[in-house]
Every structure is written in structure tokens, then in C-alpha cells.
């Protein structure tokens, strides 16, 4: 299977590259800086400079884009729309590294994590930007997309446990009542979805078991 990881130099992107290579996939990384991942095939190219030709022939494209500075937050939606336009009408699957703020906390799907009183104000701009990107993504019926939300506590440096629970649109807690997952487990689970995924045009989610 041929897999492209866009923004492969990021923390999640690098882990996805490593997990995909370990799974035996043919992996190509794309990033605007010099290659910092394990990808042997690499193209130094900004996400907004990617063309249809760059992504042609891949079975799966992983979107690992992330922006944290406030004036760059709208790029979550802009970059995702750009990738969707490039893959429109193709059989290539697009798997998006998503956010947790847009997960629902009620069965009616009217209240999101970011809408709850305890959600930190400092994360609201990011959550809103990623939530808006997901809202726009849901309108795309021309792309074979899958959006994967992490647990609420998404831990960059926590170890890989190799054990997780798949969820759907609602915030899922583990047996300890936690909403937590490491970047390492998230990347491993994402590669599992590459292998086995049938969640086309769906948002799914993850929590550590």
C-alpha cells in the first residue's frame, strides 16, 4: 500500500511515518522543511503548494497538519479544503488527524466538548478552527475521508501502550473514566485504520484502554 503523510515533520506526522513503515507500507513524506522523519521517500513542499500530480497514485493520504499560532488557525480549514480539492473524485482515502474539542458529550449531538463550562479558554480558538474545518469536511461527498479525533487529553510524550478503544462522534471514556491517549498510540491506531478502515466519510475517535 502506498501512503503519503502530509506534514510529516510534525510530532504526530513523524510517528505515523514510523508506524506505517513498520507495517510494511511504501511511505512518502511531505513537509515544508528538511526531512525529519524516517521516510526514505520525501518531498520538501508546503501543503498549500501540493498538486494533484503530487498525490496521484497513493492509496491513502494522511493529513497531519497542525497550527497553533492564532493568526494561522484558519489554515486548518484552508489546508484541509485544499487537500480535498486535490483528491476530489479519486479513490484515494484521506485520513485526517483531528481534534477532540468537536466531540459531542450528549446523545442528541447538540453539545460539544468545547461548549462545556470546564473547557479551557486558551484552547477554544484552536478547537473552534478545527471544528469549523470538520463542519466543512462533512459537506464533501466527493472525497473518501475519515476524520480521527483523539481523546481529550492528547499527550505528546506519553509512551505507547498498544491498547486503545475506538469510539464515534461522542467523547468516549475508558474503564477508569479517563479521556486520554498518547501521540504514539494515536499514530499506531491511525495506521490500523489505514489497514482495516471502512469508515469512509465518518468521524471516529480514540481513547486509551
Image (cartoon, rainbow, N blue to C red):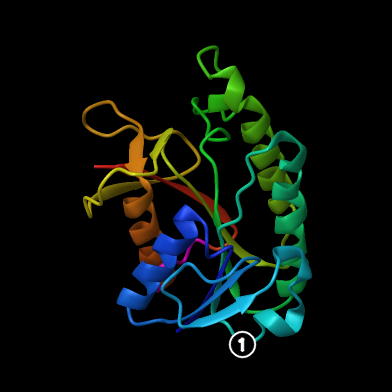
Name the residue furthest top. 117
**Residue drawn where x is 48% and y is 67% of the image:** 36
- Please provide percent x and percent y for residue 13: 49, 61
Q: How many marks are shown on the rendered structure?
A: 1
Is residue 35 located in the magenta-colored stretch of the structure? no
The quarter of the rendered structure image containing the N terminus is bottom left
Question: Horizontal placement of 77 versus 168: left or right?
Answer: right
Report if residue 115 is visible in the image.
no
Q: Position of residue 209 (x, y in %)?
A: 24, 42
183 relative to 118 in the view: left or right: left
Q: Residue furthest front?
A: 34
What residue is rendered at 75% in x and 80% in y?
A: 52
Q: Residue at x 23, y 55 (%)?
A: 162
Say if residue 90 shows up in the picture.
yes
- Residue plotted at (39% across, 66% down): 191
On the image, the x and y values in percent for residue 156 come to 39, 44
**In the image, residue 154 above or below residue 118:** below
Q: Position of residue 182 (x, y in %)?
A: 34, 45
Q: Nearer the viewer, residue 95 or 34?
A: 34
Magenta-highlighted residues = 195-199
Q: Secondary structure at mark 1?
A: loop
Q: Main secondary structure of the magenta part?
A: loop
Instruction: Specify few, some or many for label 1: CA neighbours under 10 Å numbering under 14, 14-19, or 20 or more.
Output: some
**What residue is shown with label 1?**
57
State whether residue 78 is above or below residue 44: above
Amino acid at each position: 500500500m502506498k501512503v503519503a503523510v502530509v506534514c510529516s515533520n510534525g510530532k504526530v506526522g513523524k510517528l505515523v511515518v514510523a508506524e506505517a513503515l513498520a507495517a510494511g507500507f511504501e511511505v512518502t513524506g511531505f513537509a515544508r522543511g528538511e526531512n525529519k522523519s524516517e521516510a526514505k521517500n520525501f518531498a520538501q513542499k508546503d501543503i498549500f503548494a501540493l498538486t494533484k500530480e503530487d498525490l496521484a497514485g497513493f492509496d491513502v493520504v494522511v493529513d497531519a497538519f497542525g497550527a497553533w499560532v492564532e493568526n494561522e488557525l484558519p489554515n486548518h480549514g484552508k489546508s484541509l479544503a485544499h487537500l480535498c480539492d486535490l483528491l476530489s473524485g479519486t479513490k484515494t482515502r484521506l485520513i485526517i488527524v483531528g481534534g477532540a474539542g468537536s466531540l459531542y458529550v450528549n446523545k442528541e449531538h447538540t453539545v460539544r466538548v468545547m461548549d462545556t463550562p470546564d473547557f479551557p479558554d486558551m484552547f477554544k480558538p484552536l478547537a473552534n478552527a478545527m471544528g469549523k474545518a470538520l463542519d466543512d469536511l462533512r459537506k464533501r461527498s466527493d472525497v473518501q475521508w475519515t476524520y480521527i479525533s483523539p481523546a481529550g487529553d492528547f499527550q505528546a510524550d506519553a509512551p505507547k501502550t498498544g491498547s486503545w478503544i475506538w469510539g464515534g462522534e461522542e467523547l468516549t471514556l475508558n474503564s477508569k473514566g479517563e479521556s486520554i491517549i498518547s501521540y504514539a498510540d494515536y499514530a499506531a491506531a491511525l495506521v490500523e485504520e489505514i489497514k482495516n478502515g471502512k469508515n469512509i466519510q465518518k468521524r471516529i475517535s480514540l481513547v486509551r484502554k
